[in-house]
Image (spheres, rainbow, N blue to C red):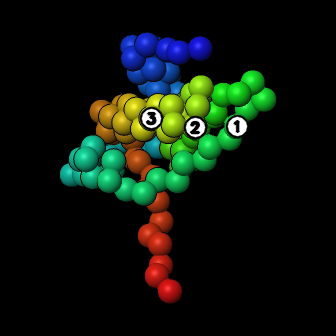
Amino acid sequence: MQRGKAAKIAFCRDTIYRVRMKVKPMKTKTNKTLDYYLSLPYTIELTPDEDGYWFAEIPLLPGCMTQGRSRAEALEMIDEAKTLWLETAIEAGITIPEPAELKSA
């Protein structure tokens, strides 16, 4: 079932609120921008579902998940979910986890 953009934003904000109440993260002021966070290599986990849909999530961003009718649609939608999650976290002053740097061999 597809959700409209307003519903996705509400879902992201509600998820971040629930995570915030559990973890009680400190509000921080950062100079890092949305573009900075969007450029980071967050790991995306894709899982095919029994009903033919694909489930996508970014484990490092609690509650950042979606589904799509195809693998391509799920990847497109997780990019939108990541953007909404990061925008909401920046606005709320929540510390945003960053992926660990990969070490080259």
Question: In the drawing, does residue 98 fall left or right of residue 29?
Answer: right
Bin the neighbour count of mark 3 within 10 Å (Cα to Cα): few under 14, some 14-19, many 20 and up: some
Dot 3: what SS? helix
For the N terminus, the quadrant is top right
Mark 1: which amino acid?
Pro
Q: As rendered, which of 101 and 79 lies closer to the eye? A: 79
Please give the name of the residue rendered at 46% of the width and 26% of the height, measured from the top-left corner. Answer: 12
Please give the name of the residue rendered at 46% of the width and 59% of the height, measured from the top-left corner. Answer: 99
- Image height check: is 3 above or below 57? above
Q: As rendered, which of 43 and 76 lies closer to the eye? A: 76
Dot 1: what SS? strand
Bin the neighbour count of mark 2 within 10 Å (Cα to Cα): few under 14, some 14-19, many 20 and up: some
Quarter of the figure with residue 90: top left
Q: What residue is shown with label 3? A: 76
Give the mark, 3 or 1, whose residue is nearer the N terminus. Answer: 1
Give the mark, 3 or 2, whose residue is nearer the N terminus. Answer: 2
**What is the number of the mark on residue 60?**
none
Q: What residue is shown with label 1? A: 48
Q: Residue furthest right?
A: 50
Residue 28: x percent and y percent?
32, 46
